[in-house]
Image: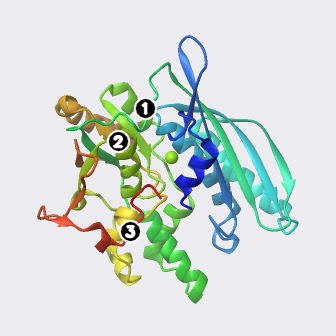
């Protein structure tokens, strides 16, 4: 059963499910956004390969990223922590320090939670509440044919970092200096927090998602929700400096990592066709203001049967060659 099929079983047709956050009416001017995420030891992280501070940061970063992806601002959060007896007071201090750092960065306040002993393994759940002007949350289902597809930042870095960590774990290799930025990216993701609300305010963004599952998977989520197709220009998708070199060293496939590697926590969004020129003009200032790049990487097309990836020469890359078989939202 895919993750999506499992969600459908729980949802039993509930209509509101399927965006990054649930949207609830708050008052005359604003809606609430609510989202929850869990990090589990042995599934999402290994204790030997992360600090507790990084863990605290990431546990909250992945949830505030969802609020940002709806164009909202994070306000408060609940924290649920399950810890085995092997976790020491010093570790808990580290965890608290990492959470506090992201609380400051994203201006969220802890309002409650729960702690419990676990038989084995650390489990951390964050539930974040945010707000967005009434009716203005940006959903996945608004993309229309002709809209331009944009991304913030770079792709593949977090999954390259994961590959580096796996080498350390399995081969007990020390970490080379050129791999540190990628490991940092994997362990301490930095979602572009002010960019979500700014994009909403432009009035030109028709759909948005944060990229946790991988660029193609999350673009497919938008396409399915919007009942449209897409053409993605692979060569336009940016990567961070040193990416090709590190991936070559690891004998990885840089295109595969870029398009299908998860956990970059960048924003993927579509801009209304007739607003593209105006949007492009506003980009220069915004990129400087937020120190975040925004790049056009493709176009939305009418037919939901078209999910095409072009190489630099404009030829279609077969996705099966990229090893990307989980196309139906898995
Ligand atoms: Mg998300």
Question: Do the residues bearing badges 1 and 2 touch, measured as CB atoms within 8 Å?
Answer: yes
How dense is the environment of label 2, judged by Cα within 10 Å: few (below 14), some, or many (20 and up)? Answer: many
The percent coordinates of residue 307 (x first, y second) are 27, 55
Q: Which residue is mark 3?
A: 257
Question: Which residue sits at x=57%, y=35%?
Answer: 14
Q: Which residue is mark 2?
A: 269
Q: Mark 2 and mark 3: span between their CA atoms? A: 20 Å
Q: Earlier in the sequence, mark 1 or mark 2?
A: 1
Q: Mark 1 and mark 2: span between their CA atoms? A: 9 Å
SS under mark 3: helix
The percent coordinates of residue 232 (x first, y second) are 24, 54
Q: Which residue is mark 1?
A: 138
SS under mark 1: loop
**Quadrant of image for the N terminus:** bottom right
Q: Please state which of residues 329 and 311 is positioned toward the viewer in this rendering.
A: 329
Question: Which residue sits at x=31%, y=71%?
Answer: 320
């Amino acid at each position: 059963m895919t993750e999506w099929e499992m969600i459908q079983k729980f949802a039993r047709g509930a209509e509101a499910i399927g965006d990054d956050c649930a949207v609830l009416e708050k008052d005359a001017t604003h809606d609430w956004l609510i989202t929850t995420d869990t990090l589990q030891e042995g599934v999402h992280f290994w204790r030997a390969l992360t600090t507790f501070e990084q863990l605290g940061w990431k546990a909250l970063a992945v949830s505030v990223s969802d609020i940002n992806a709806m164009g909202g601002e994070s306000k408060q959060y609940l924290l649920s922590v399950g810890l085995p007896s092997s976790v020491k007071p010093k570790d808990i201090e580290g965890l608290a320090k990492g959470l506090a750092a992201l609380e400051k960065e994203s201006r969220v306040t802890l309002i409650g939670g729960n702690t419990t002993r676990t038989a084995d393994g650390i489990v951390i759940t964050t539930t974040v509440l945010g707000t967005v002007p009434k009716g203005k949350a940006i959903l996945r289902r608004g993309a229309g044919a002709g809209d331009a597809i944009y991304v913030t930042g770079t792709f593949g870095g977090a999954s390259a970092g994961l590959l580096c960590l796996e080498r350390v774990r399995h081969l007990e290799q020390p970490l080379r200096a050129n791999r540190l930025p990628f490991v940092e990216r994997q362990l301490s993701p930095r979602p572009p927090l002010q960019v979500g609300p700014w994009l909403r305010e432009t009035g030109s963004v028709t759909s948005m998602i944060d990229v946790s599952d991988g660029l193609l998977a999350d673009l497919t989520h938008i396409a399915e929700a919007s009942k449209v197709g897409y053409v993605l220009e692979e060569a336009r998708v940016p990567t961070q400096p040193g990416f090709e070199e590190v991936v070559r060293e690891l004998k990885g496939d840089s295109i595969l990592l870029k398009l299908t590697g998860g956990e970059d926590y960048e924003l993927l969004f579509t801009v209304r066709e007739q607003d593209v020129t105006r949007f492009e003009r506003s980009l220069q200032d915004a990129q400087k203001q937020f120190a975040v790049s925004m790049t056009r990487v493709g176009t939305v097309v009418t037919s939901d049967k078209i999910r095409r990836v072009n190489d630099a020469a404009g030829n279609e890359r077969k996705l099966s060659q990229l090893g990307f078989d989980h196309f139906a939202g898995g």
